[in-house]
Each structure stands twice: as structure tokens, then as C-alpha cells.
Image: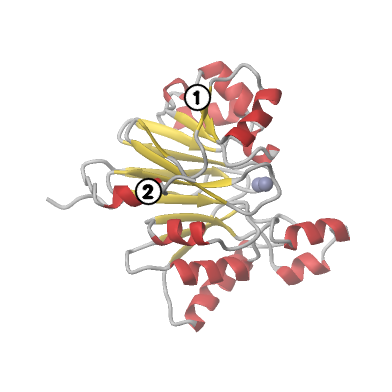
Amino acid sequence: MTASGWRGYIASKDGSVTLKVTCLGSGSSGNSLLVQADGHALLVDAGLPGTRLASALKERGVNPGDLQAVLVSHEHSDHVSGLDVLCRRYGAPVIGNEHTLSHMRKRAPRLEYRVSPTGSARSAGHFEISSFPTNHDAADPVGYVVAAGGARVTVATDLGCETPELLEAASLSDLVVIEANHDVHQLLQGPYPAHLKRRILSERGHLSNNQTAEIICNALNTRRQTYWLAHLSRTNNTKDKAVQGVVRYLANEGLVTTVLVTERDRPSLVWESSTPSF
Ligand SMILES: [Zn+2]
Ligand SMILES: [Zn+2]
């Protein structure tokens, strides 16, 4: 693996570009995050229907044909189901690592694919993009760090456990989008079959609220950080349990930070890097 790319961006603080992040949807019914920087835009995952994604972009003044890229975290359908329609119709390039893109080439052969090895860095418009490995039951899953104007967002929504790469990326970021998939008690008492419960609880499954809280504790830095809890299970979690669980855990450690929760089925949170003072 090459040296993680985002470390180099810390020095290149350029307050003239504002980084803006919008959650278009997050959960097992579809994940997509819009990242903008002064007229440039990209998506992290395209797991909502392509036509819905195109409408959501247009409503926010983004021409889908002008997308710098769609970054793919892994090949599960809740992250890629809209990719073919969106990128075939509007021509946006798809970025991911070789294993993930080899799955996508079979499902959507006519798209423009650009391979980006895990851990490498690349530019697209105003953005500097790098990825890091995550533990999840997909071919070669990754999280992403997207930087512009000296601000950084980390996105890691499907993972079964904490990893050093995730902690480093999160601790260097201003906004961290991280999953809080389930409440362990609610999952264990719930209707899922035993094999599915085992899969979700495994190190290659999904994070519980407590695991997410522990990661936030370990990643929290002295910057003014914001954490978005994402990819909540409809069956095995609630927004209140996720937020309260994390905030309580942090309070027990004497820590405070901004913790918000994304909506599953509709666009919700918007974050902007702070306006530079002149
Ligand atoms: Zn997944
Ligand atoms: Zn997912």
C-alpha cells in the first residue's frame, strides 16, 4: 500500500474553497453522499435509484453531467444500485479499487471506470481523494477521505470493527460520517435469523452504537469536529438510541463533540467548512 495521501493535505490549507457535504440518504435502502467545493461536485456511493439521485443533484444546483466522479466504497447494492443509470446517462467517471470495479464492470459494463488502489491519493477538480481499507464482507471495501480548501471529510459507513487506518483518517478530519448500525440488545432480541445476526455482529459486519462511540472517543481531536451517525438499521436501531448512546458514552469519558444523525430515506444533514475570516 502506498503512503496515505491525506496527510499531505494538512499543510495545504486554502481557506478560499469551501467544502460542503450533503447526505442524500443513508441506510440499507440506499447510501449516497454529495460533496461539493465551489462549483465542483462528487458523490461517495450511488445506492439510491439513478433517476432519484439525478433529481436530488439538480435540486441542489448540480448538473449530474458535471460530477467529477462517483467514488465507490464497495459493491453491495445499497451503495451502487443507482450507479449504472446515473453514470451511463450523464457520463460521470466511477472511481474505486480493482476488486470492487471488477464486480461493477460485470454489472454495468459501459461505464467509465478509473482504478484507484486502496491507500493511494488522486485529484479530481478541487478535491483530493484518498481511501483506506475497512473490515466488511465485500470484495475489497474502503472508506474515503475527501479534502478541499484545507477541510476534510472521512466517510466510512460499512465496517465491522475499528482499524488504525480509520482512526487516523477520522482524527485528521473535520467531518466524519460513520455508521452506527445497530443497538446490540435490539438486534439480539429482534426478528433477524441467527446467521444474519452473526454476520452483522462479526468483525466484517456492521458497527454497533457502542463500537461507534468507542471509535469516536479514540478519534476525537482538538479540532472542532462534527460526527454524523449513518447507515442506521431500520429494524435494529433508532435515531434516539444511536445519538444518546454515543453522547452518553462520550460524556462518561469526559468528552463532548457535535453528534448528528442522518435520515435513512431522504436527504438530511448538510455540513460546510467554516467560512474563512479576512
Ligand atoms: Zn455493505
Ligand atoms: Zn451498506
Q: Secondary structure at mark 1?
A: loop
Lower sequence index among marks 1 and 2: 2
What's the residue at 54%, 77% (across, down)?
Answer: 249
Mark 1 Cα shell of 10 Å, populated few (<14), some (14-19), many (≥20):
some
The spot of residue 41 in percent (x, y) is 40, 32
Q: Which image quadrant for residue 229?
A: bottom right
Q: Which image quadrant for residue 190?
A: bottom right
**Three-letter code for the amino acid on which mark 1 is drawn:** Pro
What's the residue at 41%, 48% (across, down)?
Answer: 3
The spot of residue 80 in percent (x, y) is 63, 34
Question: Which of the colour schemes (rainbow, by chain, secondary structure, one colour) is used?
Answer: secondary structure
Residue 6 numbered mark, or none: 2
Q: Is residue 78 above or below residue 83?
A: below
Q: Is residue 182 above or below residue 30?
A: below
Give the spatial CA distance, label 1 vs label 2. 21 Å
Which residue is farthest front?
Answer: 1
The spot of residue 243 in percent (x, y) is 56, 67
Towards the viewer: 221 or 120: 120
Residue 93 numbered mark, or none: 1
Q: Secondary structure at mark 2?
A: helix
Side of 213 where 204 appears, left or right: right
Residue 57 visible? The answer is: yes
Mark 2 Cα shell of 10 Å, populated few (<14), some (14-19), many (≥20):
many
What's the residue at 57%, 24% (across, down)?
Answer: 86
**Three-letter code for the amino acid on which mark 2 is drawn:** Trp
The spot of residue 214 in percent (x, y) is 55, 71
Towards the viewer: 35 or 58: 35
